Image: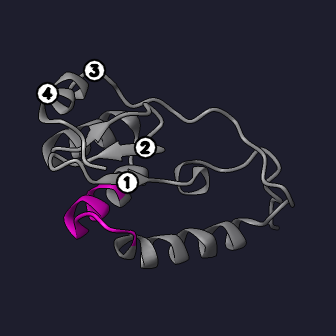
Amino acid sequence: MPLKHGYINQLRNVKKIRKPKPWKQPQPITKSQLEQMREEFWDTAPHYGGSKEIWDALKAATKQDLTFAQAIVDSAGVIVQSADLTICYDERGAKYELPKYVLSEPTNLIREI
């Protein structure tokens, strides 16, 4: 369901991006497995709806430090509902949900040698 325009204006510039809280994968995974999960998510993300440009901006933001990520989402018109970027909206009210594994590494990541 699209957001009301007034609500979108209320959300804008309220949330500043922050690092996600530590989280644990149900089964420990390696860095390469994590990267594979991320690739699969980003390959299929545009099929969840919304704008490809917003998905591209969110993907770029997840690969940057917090300051640059903030600049990316601000310039793309992304409305951040959850400060860790797990839930965002575009200016037309389309919802974008990002899984934790594209935002940070799990605490039980297996370090490869």
In the rendered image, which residue does mark 1 sit on?
Answer: 96
Question: In terms of depth relative to the viewer, which is nearer, 4 or 59?
Answer: 4
Count of all numbered marks drawn on residues in the image: 4
Q: Secondary structure at mark 4?
A: helix
In front: mark 1 or mark 4? 4
Label 1 packing within 10 angstroms: few (<14), some (14-19), many (20+)? many
Q: Closer to the N terminus: mark 2 or mark 1?
A: 2
Q: Closer to the N terminus: mark 1 or mark 3?
A: 3
- Dominant secondary structure (helix, strand or loop) of the stretch shown in magenta: helix
> Is residue 55 inside the magenta stretch?
yes
Residues shaded magenta: 48-58
The image quarter in which residue 107 lies: top right
Kindly report the distance in space between the C-alpha atoms of the residues bearing marks 1 and 3.
Answer: 17 Å
Q: Secondary structure at mark 3?
A: loop
Q: Residue at x 24, y 40 (%)?
A: 3
Kindly report the distance in space between the C-alpha atoms of the residues bearing marks 2 and 3.
Answer: 14 Å
Residue 87, numbered label: 2
Q: Say if mark 2 contacts mark 4, CB within 8 Å.
A: no
Q: Residue at x 43, y 41 (%)?
A: 85
In the rendered image, which residue does mark 3 sit on?
Answer: 14
Q: Secondary structure at mark 2?
A: strand
Q: Amino acid at mark 2?
A: Ile
Kindly report the distance in space between the C-alpha atoms of the residues bearing marks 1 and 4.
Answer: 19 Å
Kindly report the distance in space between the C-alpha atoms of the residues bearing marks 2 and 1.
Answer: 6 Å
- In the image, residue 68 sits, relative to residue 90, either above or below, namely above
Q: Amino acid at mark 3?
A: Val
